[in-house]
Amino acid sequence: MARYAIRLEELTKDYPIGFWRSRPVRALDHVSLDVEPGEVLGYLGPNGAGKTTTLKLLMQLVYPTSGRAEILGRPAGDVEAKRRLGYLPELPYFYDNLTAEELLVYFGGLFGLAPAVARTRASILLDRVGLGAERRRRLRHYSKGMLQRVGIAQALVNDPEVVFLDEPMSGLDPVGRRDTRELIRSLRDEGRTVFFSSHILSDAEALCTRVAIMVQGRLVSTGRLADLAFEVQGWELVVSGGDGGALASLGLDAVTTAVDGRYVVELPVDRPPDQVLPELSRLHVQVVSLTPRHESLEDYFMRLVARRQAPAA
Amino acid sequence: MSVIPRIAAQVFKESVRDKVLYNLVLFAVLLIAASYLIGQLTAGQDVKIIKDLGLAATQIFGLFIAVFIGIGLVSKEVERRSIYSLLSKPVRRHELILGKYAGLVLTLAVNVGVMAVALYAVLGYMSWVETEEFRRSWEAPATDPAMLAAIVLIFVQLMLVTAIALFFSTFSSPMLSAVLTFGLYVVGHFNADLRNFESVVESPAAVSLARVLYYALPNLAPFDVKAQVVHAQPVSLGYVALTSAYAAAYIGALLLAAVFIFSKRDFK
Ligand SMILES: Nc1ncnc2c1ncn2[C@@H]1O[C@H](COP(=O)(O)OP(=O)(O)OP(=O)(O)O)[C@@H](O)[C@H]1O
Ligand SMILES: [Mg+2]
């Protein structure tokens, strides 16, 4: 058994641009990273950081300029490794004329599943990603979010040990995002290794055992999210039971009414929840949820850069 | 079952659903049927005309199917990015190419089969309605089994054209692939002229270039035995076998080149 589920060694990728290929773009710059079996790794970075490129290298859709990528102890592209992995491409697209069911049966067949077995597996997986009766319609009629769900289902058709998801939340509505989060959590509970990319921190917060942060093709930090010192920029508080007046009496602005008599309150940094919560209970207002708002990855990166440059200035 | 037959089966299933394909085959069958009417207008010649038109229709419509499905097989997967998920399955790149090719050959076999059955049906009907005396004036019986030689060679030629289309589509756009494939198809029919080039020009350089082209470009004229079959001249089994062997070698080389190019590609 391989020590690492995923291993990147000095992985580098240049994309040639222009006809004369004079100055290639370095999409990935000597990235080394190990992921242990059972880990859920959030591969984070702003647009253009090299996340998709890394995943394509792992699937051997593109070849590295230098360095290597391994999955389950085998080089990228190895068929035995591919039997044991699943991959959701970024903005997935399949075949217009197939239904979701047919697609999964076809892909299941490529893993050697008999049609009957593949059909059963397909129906379980399509339930799991929340695709209803539309599974019998052709994929050409699917919305972006529905395709994303099909994409997740097809990534799991072989019961993979390692799952690669490129921006699994993109194109999904809030319910879809929550479902996907639940799904990734269940993949983790089933002991699978999950490698997913995102440019949204909060996606990673709830799920990851570890994150790796990429900026402009370089790995800038890895570790537990809690240790990476993202600045909290406030909190989002959802309450019910009070009215706008009660909340106004606390001097909280930025209150919006949500459905079912719920209010969404933006707490600024100078009104931390431990100050506000006691007052709310005095006013018989119930707290529905409380979420910290972190700075974005872009802000985090800007701060890192600023800090690095500061001593020189 | 390995992945190649599974990919082939999928190509077949999808093309069977393709409306364009239905229409092409339907149109070809109608044309073959209509050739009966045309035959009626030209008394005495009729059975030859039906054979000639029927075989030509089979060839032309087969050509359209081979090119238009052939160029899309791989390039559509790349263009629409469905190849990303396909290649993450336990599929090697050469298996993808070979599976796609086998699937289209299967599709062509069924279509050529349907057109051949339609042709024999029209000829059979004709033979049935005409008088014994009139039938005796024909050079060959209406449902002459020798026509099968022409049909087999049409099919083998279409296999070769499919390989050409697939080869081009592994590195160029569908549009360009179509143009190049049709171009090569036309050139392939006049290829034999290149061999006699030295009788026309003096320059030894031009002659050797013509020689190279003669051997490198596909030679498609030998696959066309319509005229012999229609005029009841025998086409030997040995000829069919040799011509097919030539096609097999050429197809092998094209697929090898397609696999080689496709395996090196970055899908970005
Ligand atoms: N086909 C290509 N040709 C040239 N450059 C490319 C190509 N694909 C990606 N790049 C470049 O490589 C870099 C990394 O791109 P990549 O798609 O991996 O980023 P990403 O982290 O996935 O971004 P996003 O969050 O927008 O999906 C970018 O600078 C991009 O411009
Ligand atoms: Mg990306």
Image (spheres, grey):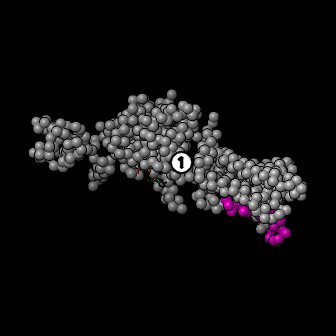
**Magenta-colored stretch includes residue A20:** no
Q: Amino acid at mark 1?
A: Asn
In the foreground, A250 or B154: B154
The residue depicted at 82 percent of the width and 71 percent of the height is B200
Residue B103 location, x and y as percent?
Answer: 65, 45
- Specify the quadrant of the image occupied by residue A289: top left
Please name the predominant secondary structure of the magenta segment in the image. Answer: helix
The secondary element bearing badge 1 is classed as loop
Residue A33 location, x and y as percent?
Answer: 43, 39
Q: Chain of mark 1?
A: A
Is A86 situated above or below A140? above
The residue depicted at 61 percent of the width and 47 percent of the height is B16
The residue depicted at 68 percent of the width and 61 percent of the height is B182
Residue B205 location, x and y as percent?
Answer: 78, 67
Residue B226 location, x and y as percent?
Answer: 80, 57
For the question of whether residue A20 can be seen, the reply is yes
B188 on left or right of A174: right
| Residue named by callout 1 | A97
Chain part drawn in magenta: B181-205
A242 on left or right of B47: left
